[in-house]
Every structure is written in C-alpha cells, then in structure tokens.
Image (cartoon, rainbow, N blue to C red):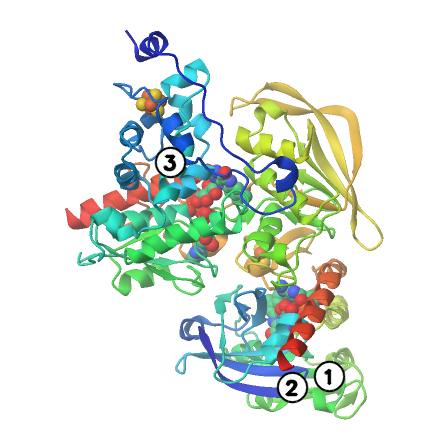
Amino acid sequence: MTQEQSAKKGRKIQPRVAMPEQPARERSGNFDEVALGYRREDALAETARCIQCKNPKCRKGCPVEIDIKGFIGRLQQDDLSGAHEIIRQYNSLPAVCGRVCPQESQCEGACVLAAKGEPVAIGRLERYVADTFAASGACEQLTGTRECTLDRPLRVACVGGGPAGLSCAGHLAALGVKVTVFEALHEVGGVLVYGIPRFRLPKAVVRREVEAMRALGVEFVTNWVAGRTFQLRELMEQGFDAVFIGVGAGLPRFLNVPGENLLGVYSANEYLTRVNLGRAFSFPDHDTPPPHTGRVVVVGGGNVAMDAARTALRLGADEVTILYRRTEAEMPARAEETHHALEEGVKLRCLCSPIAFNGDADMKLTSVTAQLMELGAPDESGRCRPVCVEGASEEIPADTAVIAVGTRPNPILLEATPELELNKWGYIQADPETGETSMPNVFAGGDIVTGAATVISAMGAGRRAAKTIAERFLG
Amino acid sequence: MYKIVNKRSLIPGQTSMLVIEAPQVALKAEPGNFVMLRVHEQGERIPLTIADADPEAGTITLVFLVVGKTTAHLDSLEEGDSLQDVCGPLGRPTEIESRGTVVCVGGGTGVAAMHHIAKGHARAGNRVIAIVGARSESLLLFCDELAGFCPEVRIATDDGSRGHKGFVTQVLQRLIDEGEEIAEVVAVGPVPMMRAVAELTRPYGIKTTVSLNSIMVDGIGMCGACRCSVGGETRFACVDGPEFDGHEVDFDELWRRLGQFREQEAVSREHFHQCRCGESK
Ligand SMILES: Cc1cc2nc3c(=O)[nH]c(=O)nc-3n(C[C@H](O)[C@H](O)[C@H](O)COP(=O)(O)OP(=O)(O)OC[C@H]3O[C@@H](n4cnc5c(N)ncnc54)[C@H](O)[C@@H]3O)c2cc1C
Ligand SMILES: Cc1cc2nc3c(=O)[nH]c(=O)nc-3n(C[C@H](O)[C@H](O)[C@H](O)COP(=O)(O)OP(=O)(O)OC[C@H]3O[C@@H](n4cnc5c(N)ncnc54)[C@H](O)[C@@H]3O)c2cc1C
Ligand code: SF4
Ligand code: FES
C-alpha cells in the first residue's frame, strides 16, 4: 500500500490551518507584515496533519533537504527546541525561508497530502519554529554552549551578503571556521534588505538572523565592493584559504523601447531600493526621496513585480496596474503573492506588453503604449509564447512606470576578475555539485551562477560550497 | 566609521573640502573615481568624486557644493566627526595615456574632480593646460594646486574679476584658434558647461570627455537610476562611467533627469532646517 493510499484510508485529514493575516483594507495602508504567523494552537493543529510518511516526499522537494518529517515529528511531541535544532542543521535563515520560499512548488508541492489538495503547511511551521526561537542566542542553540570557539585553522571570505553568502558563512561558522563577509552596500542581506519589502519580510527578521551569525563569530565588512575596493586575488594573498562569491545578479534589465528614460520610469530595483534600503517610506525623517506614485503601471509578472505594485499602493498610488504579456496562469510570481496583491487592490492586465513610453514637453511620463498579445505555441520554457496581435495596441495613462522584467549579471566583479570563466549567458561558471569556479578554491553560487532564482536555491548553493570547503580543508 | 581628519571651508557656506580617513579607498582610488557616502543612519546615499587620495596617510579628499539636505548636513560636520558610510572607489577610472596636450576644463565645484584627472594626465607625461571657470574670483578653486603640475592655468570669471571676462568656452576657443594641437579635452562641471564644451569641440573633431553627475542610488549598478543616453544607447553612469564621450551624450535628458526629485528635495531641505532650528532652541 502506498503512503497516499494509507493517508486516504487512515483517519480523516483535517483542513489546513489558515494563516492569520492583516485585513487587506488595513494593510494596503501600512508597511507592517501582512502574514502574522501561526500562534501556538495553530501550529499544533497544523503539525498534527503530518502523517509522518515512511518515505517522505517533502524533503526531496526542499533545495537544502531539511529533514522536514523530523522537525514536524518533534513538534508533534511538543519539542520546539528539538525541531529548531533539526532545521538549523540544514538552514541558517529559517525565519526568512519560512516567509519567502515558493513552498507550493517545493516541499509542499511534493508532500503526499498535496495530491489530496492540501499539503502540510511546512513553510508556516518552519517560520513558527524560527520565530519562536529567535529570542535565544544562536551559539547556544547550535552548540549547547554560550561561547562559540573559532579554532579551526581555516579562513574563508564570502563576497556578497545575500542569502547565498550568508548561508555559506553560517554553515562554516557553525563548524568553528573563521568567516568574513564582504558586502558592497551598507547593510547586509542582499535582496532580503534592498528588494523584498518589509510587509513581506520585516527587516528585523533579517537583522536577527545576521546577529545570530555575528554571535557565531562571523565578521561583517560593509561598504566593500569586490572588483573595486579589493580584488579576489588579494584575498588569497591576505591569507584567506577559500572564497565564496555570492554577489547576486544585480543589473536591471530594461525593455529597450522608446521613452524608457522619461521621468517617472523606474527599474523595480530603484523603486524598491529607495523604499527598502533607503527607508523612503518614512521620508523626510529618512532622507532618500520616495519614488513617484500617481497612476502606476508595473511591467512584469514575477515576485518583483508584485512587490513593486504593492509598495506603490502603500506609498499612496491612485491606482496600480500590472501589465503582463502572458496570462495569470503563466505568471512566475508565487501564487500567494499574486493573491495578496489582487486582494489589496492591484489590477492585473494580461496579454499586453509595452512598446513605448510617452511623455509631455517636460519629459514626464504620461502614458504607456501597450501591444496586445495572445498565447501561441509553447516555447523552450514550456510556457505558451506570447505573440503580438497584429495592429492591436492600446494607450494606458500613467504617471509612473516600474519595469520588473529581470536582471543581468553585474559587471563590476566579473570585469575585474577575468580569470573567472563565465557561461554563455554571462553568469559565473561553477561546478553544480561543489560550486567551485575556474579559480581554484574560489566558489560561487546564487543568482550570479543561476540567474535570478530563489532565496532557498541561493542558500542551497551556499551550503554546498560550505560543505565542500569544510571537507577539503578540515577533512 | 569614517573620521573627518581635516575640514576646510573653501567658499564659506557654499563649498567645503573634507579629508576623510578611508584607508582601503585611498589605496585603490584612481582619477575619475567617486565614493557613495551616507552622513548618518537616516541619510541618503550620495555620490562625490574623489578629488585626491593619499594612500600613505589613508585618506581621501572630497570637495562638495552645498545644494541640498545631505550636502548641508555634510557641511555642518567638524573635524573629528565621522561619516556613517564611505563606499568606493567606484566608477571606471579615467582612461589616461600619454598622448600630448590635454586641456582640462573645470567649472564650479567640478574643478575638484577635474584636478584629480588633470593630475593623472600630467603624471602620464601629458602636457596639461587647465581652464578654470567661476562666477567671480572669490569662487575660484584649485588654481594654485593646478599650477603645481600644469604649465598653463587659464582662468575665466563671469564678472571679469580675474582672468578672462566670460566663459571657459571662450578661453578654449582662443586656445584652439591659437593653433594649439589638442589631443583631448576633459570637461567637468555643470551640465550646461559640459554641453557647451562638447558643442565647441565637435566641429574640430577633438576627443572630448565629460563626467556625468546623474542621480545615483546604489552606485554599484543595481538600480538603473543613473542611466543616461550615450550614442543612442542606455548606459549606467556608475558602472559604465561616469566619464563618457561628450559628443555622444544626450545632455538634455541628463539635465531633466537631474530635476526628477526637485519637490522632494525641497521638502527635505525644509525638514532639515526645521530640525536644526529645533535643536538650537
Ligand atoms: C523584489 C524581489 C522579490 C523577490 N521575492 C522572492 C521570494 O518571494 N521568494 C524567493 O525565494 N525569492 C525571491 N526573490 C529572489 C531572491 O531574492 C534571489 O534569488 C536571492 O536573493 C539571490 O541571492 P544571492 O545571495 O545570490 O544574491 P543577492 O540577494 O542579490 O545578494 C547579493 C549581495 O551581494 C552584494 N554585492 C554585489 N556585488 C558585490 C561586489 N562586487 N562586492 C561585494 N558585494 C557585492 C549585493 O549588494 C548583495 O547584498 C526576489 C527578488 C527580488 C529582487
Ligand atoms: C559621479 C558623481 C560625482 C559627483 N561628485 C561631486 C563632487 O565632487 N562635488 C559635488 O559637490 N557634487 C558632486 N556630485 C553631485 C552630488 O552628488 C549632489 O550634489 C548631491 O547628491 C546633492 O545632494 P543633496 O541632498 O545635498 O541635494 P538635493 O537637494 O538632494 O539635490 C540637489 C541636486 O543634486 C542632484 N542630486 C540629488 N540627489 C542626488 C544623488 N543621489 N546622486 C547624484 N546627484 C543627486 C540633483 O541634481 C539635485 O537637483 C557628483 C555626482 C555624481 C553622480
Ligand atoms: S510533510 Fe507531507 S510528505 Fe512530509 S512527512 Fe509530513 S505528510 Fe509526509
Ligand atoms: S546608481 Fe544604481 S545603477 Fe547606477
């Protein structure tokens, strides 16, 4: 009998416990977190739904292979600290992952209960465990003592303080390795601090995870730009045994259509960085000027587009419309994010793609000309290719446009380090198993290897590199 | 933290010079580079050119014009105070090769940046002629420093209080008319000045390099705020520049993009002055 059959035959499975949320009407007017997190009774009820499969599928769906059955099992025995200990063995940023991972297509998508429609809410449970444990020190939880000893004869530099670099640093530090993280911006966290808005991932959550690493002895150096402030080869000369590169994908893509440099047209990165890193939502108490609002058009269909659209609402936009060239079914954003955005009042216009931005005499954006599209045959990504409807276009009035159509590799480090081999898309060529690059003992992972991906896949890459480094140098 | 070890008011209330402890930046700084700085925890990241660097002392020199909230705050700091963040050196260094006579034109605070570039050209063995412009004599900057390595420093003031009465472009025109063999013109200063220099040299086909001061947010190629049109293509001033071929730059677009946040900047300035008044009470 398969597990699924036994699940069907066994006791009746309760419906998934809903996540408490701020009501849509309230939250679209503030930057506070939308999803409020399980309370203890919610978590216990959801935990009870897990049937503790003999051969759990969920774990295979997780890029860092958290022992999900194990940690939920501990929760079933009301052993929170045991559950946390298990998660931390695999994941150094559980409070972040519990919030932003696309669980529906990873662990939860693979959970045997998914076949029946409602998988165990693994992400929410992970978040619950991480948040509940946040108060106590990281060292103590990982090692049982207050002091972390950094006595391993190994020094590692992590270049870039996003999820990839942090995960690599966290794993090595837990083994007692001395790690220094070099970050170009003034705050550590990568997309978690400059991209993903606080209503989805409060910055205190990221800071807490970073502080936990500091407690483990990780050193953070901010305002250091690899390729400009220092070169990779200099790190080796300074006595670093290995380097991990996790600098993200960075450079925003534009559409290359007329009018794109008009006033009021932003990249999603600028729109979000002003608000998140620059805290422009509290302008003028913080100095960074907020981007413009009015009638806002967001171009794209991924998480970045959703974040920009929902940020625009919170900044006071009159209306926010997302333009996407395929249909809602093909949108790459997490279903939960699209759902939240629509609930908050974001409008969605599918099957159209901007071909021009139009402005007035002062070069201010006034409208977007959109080409209407229809779905054609599937392309190499397996999704239907959008094709132009000949001669059909429409002019959409707009004061602000935000372009969220992806990124390209940032050239700063790559140009300064010609020794690094790149793949045909211009990203760093790295061994898929170990993360090692064409430079010996230099590893790379995250978006700079894969192109824009997910927090958890970046973390998985950091973890794999950390494992290789530890095995190579510590045996 | 990045300590201010020396502060000099060059033009009181308007232009100041800071020498800041930033050893790693000083070690790597080359002519044409800039830094992104934040004055304090709630501050905006702003770009300023590295006007000079002393790797041995571990310091960099910044010269800035007080135009708004951040530069006003910067100007209120004293020796011994510290800046929250200094990130750099950023941008591509000036392309410097030995090519003969290079004319470096600087206007307003741009002279500070021009000075570092001119120094690089002189070090590479070029004969550097400096043209410095300001509204009047009291607003002239770096003339003595430039004289240290430029065989000629020509001056233009709007009111004629020193040097030629008129614009730097007129001085440059005269130099060309005199038959000077010019390998390259470098212009750093206000947008209208850089545009005028580029327009002047265009018919003569003289290579002209300008340094674009577009609005920047991160300064490391992540946001696209600094984009500008050069030769009909979109380029990012922070990673592809800040120096570009002046004959290819769309100055009109640059000028308009610089005005994007005028309303918010006014609010910010007002807010800053109110806070300051509150403090002194
Ligand atoms: C708005 C937005 C929303 C997203 N939402 C989700 C989501 O909900 N779920 C999800 O799983 N994924 C999401 N993603 C994608 C996810 O954030 C990325 O895949 C992930 O952050 C990649 O991690 P990374 O460590 O490779 O790079 P990054 O997070 O980009 O971090 C790279 C770090 O390196 C620094 N750096 C860059 N160049 C240098 C240099 N030369 N020297 C030193 N430091 C440098 C950068 O400043 C940055 O801090 C989102 C992305 C964005 C932009
Ligand atoms: C590469 C580069 C080098 C520069 N070097 C110098 C220098 O050596 N000395 C100097 O005095 N100035 C320099 N500038 C300009 C300087 O950055 C701006 O004057 C400063 O940001 C103004 O900030 P504020 O808050 O005082 O004024 P605000 O009131 O915010 O703005 C006043 C004007 O400054 C410009 N500006 C505003 N914000 C920014 C920003 N984030 N980035 C760039 N420009 C902005 C706009 O034109 C604006 O209208 C440089 C700019 C760039 C891009
Ligand atoms: S989470 Fe799902 S797949 Fe994993 S053990 Fe529980 S029921 Fe099985
Ligand atoms: S300032 Fe952000 S890309 Fe240049």
Give the mark nearer the N terminus: 1 vs 2: 1
Marks 3 & 2, CB-CB < 8 Å contact: no
SS for dot 3: helix
Query: What is the quadrant of the N terminus of chain B in the image?
Result: bottom left
Pick out the residue farthest to the left: A475
Marks 1 & 2, CB-CB < 8 Å contact: yes
Residue B205 seen in this snapshot:
no
Pick out the residue farthest to the right: A361
Q: CA distance from mark 1 to mark 2?
A: 8 Å
Residue A100 seen in this snapshot:
yes
Q: Identify which amino acid the numbered label 3 is placed on.
A: Glu
Q: Identify which amino acid the numbered label 2 is placed on.
A: Leu
On screen, A184 above or below A107?
below
Q: Residue at x 50, y 39 (%)?
A: A36
- The residue lying toward the viewer, choosing from B218 and A127, is A127
* Mark in the foreground, 3 or 2: 3
Q: Which mark is residue B134?
A: 1
Q: Residue at x 58, y 83 (%)?
A: B17
SS for dot 1: strand
Q: CA distance from mark 3 to mark 2?
A: 61 Å
Q: Residue B62: horizontal and vertical position, in percent?
A: 55, 78
On screen, A126 above or below B102?
above
Displayed-image quarter of ligand 3: top left
Residue marked by disc 2: B141
Residue marked by disc 3: A126
Q: Is residue A312 left or right of residue A398?
A: left
Q: Residue A432: horizontal and vertical position, in percent?
A: 33, 36
SS for dot 2: loop
